[in-house]
Amino acid sequence: MELPRKQWQALGIESEPILIKQFSEGENHHTCLIKAGADTWVIKKFEHSFDQAVEGQKHAAALGIAPAIKRAESPLLLMGYIDAQPLANPHNQDLDRLAACLAKLHAAPYSGSRVFDLVGFSEHYANQVGSWEQNKHRELSGALDWFCQDQTPTTFCHNDLVLQNIIIKNEQTFFIDWEFAAINNPWFDLAAVIVYASLDKDQAKRFLTAYQPTWGELVNKPIFLSAQITLLWLDLLWHCAREPNYRSLHQPRFDHLEKLASEFNRLTTA
């Protein structure tokens, strides 16, 4: 990512930055690590969703769970660098810290009004895929509707908690990439951790109990399954809309979806 002089000066960088690392590109941004004088920064250049990302990250940074923003001048965002690797294969202590971090995010008062358009996203992607995926979308409508009609109070959510967006350093948890942050059912964030970290039922129960003491018992309720189905299916639709051969290359993910759907159907039709 090239950074012309007028851009890095507009961000308050006093000396010409040196590119240290180019991170993998996201759907709507380019990100790199730079060094300017004695300081190291992460800089992101957005294609869209700049305001939403900045609003969400500022809110989370004030809670101490996102990198601090130094300067934001559309389409560029300059932020502090957290020298740690993304979460991978989380252990129990990681899950406990992650649950506490999510509880903090979801409980904090939020003044924004932007709502995550789950139905709009799913329909948009469903219109871009083949007949198999469209039929599957209709088959899953019961679980998707169950989640959309769930009465859990909505909160401010991250809405894109792939493990690459979760960083734990010195027993502190941070979330990055806030482009989809908006008001949503908190189960969407919780389901993301359960699905992407491949938690079994016992691990999920521990994670949910650490989030809210009474929520561990909900592993036997339809919301536990419908949230995972909704999260996973939206993820799969997104990938299938961009890669026609995605299903054949990632069949285990679709097999897991089928297992969740079968369990949901048994639970709700018993």
Image: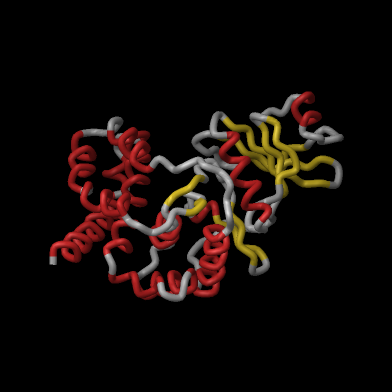
How many numbered marks appear?
0
Q: 116 above or below 242?
A: below
How far across and down, in percent of the image, does residue 259 sit? 23, 60
How far across and down, in percent of the image, does residue 35 sit? 78, 42
Q: Residue at x 52, y 38 (%)?
A: 26
On screen, residue 5 versus residue 203, left or right, reads right
Q: Residue at x 28, y 36 (%)?
A: 126
Q: 241 above or below 188?
A: above
Quarter occupied by residue 105: bottom right
Looking at this view, name the residue that lies furthest to the left: 270
How far across and down, in percent of the image, does residue 29 sit? 57, 35
Quarter occupied by residue 65: bottom right
- Quadrant containing the C terminus in the rendered view: bottom left
Q: Nearer the viewer, residue 213 or 13?
A: 213
On screen, residue 170 versus residue 221, left or right, reads right
Q: How is the image coloured?
A: secondary structure
Q: Nearer the viewer, residue 194 or 120?
A: 120
On screen, residue 135 versus residue 57, left or right, reads left
Q: 68 above or below 243?
A: below
Q: Residue at x 67, y 37 (%)?
A: 77
Q: Residue at x 72, y 28 (%)?
A: 3
- Quadrant containing the N terminus in the rendered view: top right
How far across and down, in percent of the image, does residue 255 sit? 25, 55
